[in-house]
């Protein structure tokens, strides 16, 4: 009887603690790719959807307070002359959606903006650029993107470019090129965070050595748990952390668990061909995106199920080897073709991570850091480095 009473009191205490935390916690996600859906499909942030992973109603449900939205044009999908216009279109779409929904969401240009917007009860939208290929090898274009709100740039995407080697392409520079070093210095100078996701391990180490500001891995998971190309090995995680940087864990089910990745990679050529065919055969059919989602769903169902608890393991691993200041969230929602972990299907689910971290014994302070404050700290540090130059 006494034991039952103790258990009840403990559960009530945990419930109180959870409610207290959720009251004002800043949940900040470093990488969500929704803007392309706005451009391609007329997706509206204001409406609640039964598909894709982010809209304003679901952000509110999940207490997601700030998002660094990804702007991109994959080098393998778009002709080089489309890289810059496609990026500008997606960035404009984000600004337009934020303006349309100004009573709920506001564009943030600084760490102070994020804090002010969060305190006002609104959601903060920030922008990021995924891949150095998007700036047409021009530091002037980089600076203009900064003026338009871009707050980090990933140095390379799925292909190596003139700045850095990609993790998923041939090695061209043996890490970061001379031009890449110049780019990092310029990003430091203007206060744009340097994102080391997607680039080769050697390139990450080069960036860490070159950058005066802490760097971000905006959406990278842990290689020691899931040994696949896109994930980060422990020595690289530690190097990023030593310089005050943050590794934001990617939620892609295939990046969390290798067994899921193997099935995904085996089926990928067939899946991608089916999607290509559906899009070309139905070029003017507004139902084509629904057909694409159907194809993605069918292939996702063949992958072994990955529970969101595996995601907590990745977070815990980084915290254990590099400290709780070195880990954050970079879901890659709306960029992972619906391959989400069970229990973490969209942005409405973030509170389960808070609960999970509580159960794993993390302090309130560490939970706040992991759920958002670490990313905010890197953004602020980048601004400080810029202000001193
Ligand atoms: Zn990516």
Image (cartoon, rainbow, N blue to C red):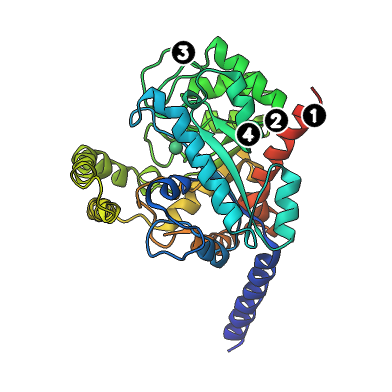
Where residue 174 is drawn, which disc sits there? 3
The answer to whether 82 is drawn above or below residue 161 in the figure is below
As drawn, is 152 to the left or to the right of 312? right
Which residue is denoted by mark 4 in the rendering? 241
Residue at image position (49%, 63%) is 349
Image marks 2 and 1: residues in contact by CB distance under 8 Å: yes
Q: Helix or strand or loop: what does disc 4 sit on?
A: helix
Looking at the rendering, in which quadrant would you find the N terminus? bottom right
2 or 3: mark nearer the eye: 2
Residue at image position (26%, 56%) is 287
* In the foreground, 273 or 369: 273
2 or 4: mark nearer the eye: 2
Image marks 4 and 3: residues in contact by CB distance under 8 Å: no
Which residue is denoted by mark 2 in the rendering? 191
Where residue 329 is drawn, which disc sits there? none
Residue 303 can be seen in this image? no
As drawn, is 96 to the left or to the right of 54? right
4 or 3: mark nearer the eye: 3
Residue sticking out furthest to the right: 388
Instruction: Tell me how far mark 4 sits from mark 3, CA to CA.
Output: 22 Å
The answer to whether 67 is drawn above or below residue 239 in the figure is below
């Amino acid at each position: 009887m006494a034991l039952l009473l103790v258990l009840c009191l403990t559960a009530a205490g945990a419930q109180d603690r959870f409610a207290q935390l959720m009251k004002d916690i800043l949940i900040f996600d470093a990488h969500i790719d929704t803007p392309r859906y706005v451009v391609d499909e007329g997706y509206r942030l204001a409406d609640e959807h039964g598909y894709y992973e982010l809209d304003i109603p679901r952000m509110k449900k999940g207490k997601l307070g700030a998002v660094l939205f990804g702007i991109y044009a994959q080098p393998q999908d778009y002709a080089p002359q489309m890289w810059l216009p496609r990026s500008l279109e997606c960035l404009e779409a984000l600004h337009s959606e934020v303006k349309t929904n100004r009573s709920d969401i506001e564009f943030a240009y600084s760490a102070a903006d994020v804090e002010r917007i969060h305190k006002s009860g609104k959601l903060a939208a920030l922008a990021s650029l995924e891949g150095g290929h998007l700036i047409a090898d021009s530091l002037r274009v980089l600076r203009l993107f900064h003026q338009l709100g871009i707050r980090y740039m990933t140095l390379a995407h799925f292909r190596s470019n003139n700045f850095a080697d990609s993790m998923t392409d041939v090695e061209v520079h043996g890490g970061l090129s001379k031009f890449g070093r110049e780019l990092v210095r310029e990003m430091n100078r203007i206060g744009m965070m340097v994102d080391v996701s997607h680039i080769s391990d050697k390139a990450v180490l080069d960036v860490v050595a070159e950058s005066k500001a802490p760097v971000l891995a905006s959406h990278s998971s842990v290689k020691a748990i899931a040994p696949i190309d896109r994930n980060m090995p422990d020595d690289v995680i530690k190097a990023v952390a030593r310089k005050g940087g943050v590794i934001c864990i990617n939620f892609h089910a295939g990046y969390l668990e290798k067994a899921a990745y193997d099935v995904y990679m085996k089926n990928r050529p067939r899946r991608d061909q089916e999607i290509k065919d559906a899009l070309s055969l139905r070029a003017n059919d507004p139902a084509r995106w629904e057909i694409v989602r159907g194809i993605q769903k069918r292939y996702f169902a063949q992958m072994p199920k990955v529970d969101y608890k595996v995601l907590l393991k990745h977070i815990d691993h980084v915290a254990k080897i590099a400290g709780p200041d070195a880990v954050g969230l970079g879901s890659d929602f709306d960029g992972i073709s619906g391959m989400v972990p069970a229990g973490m299907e969209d942005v409405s689910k973030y509170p389960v991570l808070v609960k999970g971290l509580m159960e794993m014994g993390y302090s309130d302070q560490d939970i706040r850091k992991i759920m958002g404050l670490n990313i905010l700290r890197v953004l602020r540090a980048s601004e400080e480095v810029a202000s001193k130059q």
